[in-house]
Image (cartoon, helix red, strand yellow):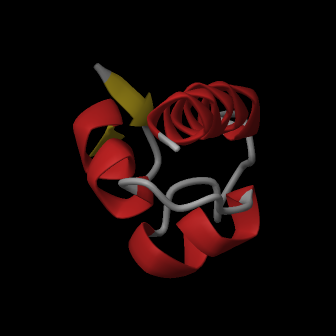
């Protein structure tokens, strides 16, 4: 699923970038560009980050 239409970044790309790390939207933007233009995808990025953080807590 495309998360950032401005930069054509999908959820898999963001999941790979996060992979076990707790990051901010700004850090995701720095790494792949998602969220760096219009900001319309920030909420979707935040949901992906929250889901990743939950997985990290469960794995620990």
Q: Is residue 8 visible?
A: no
Q: Position of residue 30 (x, y in %)?
A: 56, 80
Left or right of residue 28: residue 39: right
Side of 57 where 52 appears, left or right: left
**Do we see residue 11 in this rendering?**
yes
Please, which residue is most extreme toward the top here? 1
Seen as rendered, the residue at the extreme bottom is 30
Residue 35 at what x, y percent from top left?
Answer: 63, 54
Please state if 8 lies on the left or on the right of 44 as rendered.
left
- Name the spot of residue 26 as percent of width and height, x first: 73, 69
Task: Please report the residue visible at 66 percent of the width from the left and 25 percent of the height from the top.
Answer: 47
Q: Position of residue 11 (x, y in %)?
A: 34, 33
Question: Which is more toward the observer, 36 or 31?
Answer: 31
Q: Is residue 45 left or right of residue 24?
A: left
Toward the front, the furthest residue is: 60
Task: Specify the quadrant of the image occupied by residue 54.
Answer: top right
User: Residue at the spot x=48%, y=68% of the render?
Assistant: 33
Residue drawn at x 71%, y 36% as measured from the top left: 46
Q: Is residue 44 above or below residue 16?
A: above
* Quarter residue 29 falls in: bottom right
Question: Residue 46 or 19: which is nearer the viewer?
Answer: 19
């Amino acid at each position: 699923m495309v998360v950032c239409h401005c930069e054509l970044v999908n959820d898999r790309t963001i999941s790979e970038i996060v992979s076990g790390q707790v990051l901010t939207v700004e850090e995701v933007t720095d790494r792949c560009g998602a969220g760096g233009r219009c900001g319309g995808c920030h909420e979707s990025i935040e949901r992906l980050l929250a889901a990743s953080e939950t997985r990290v807590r469960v794995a620990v």
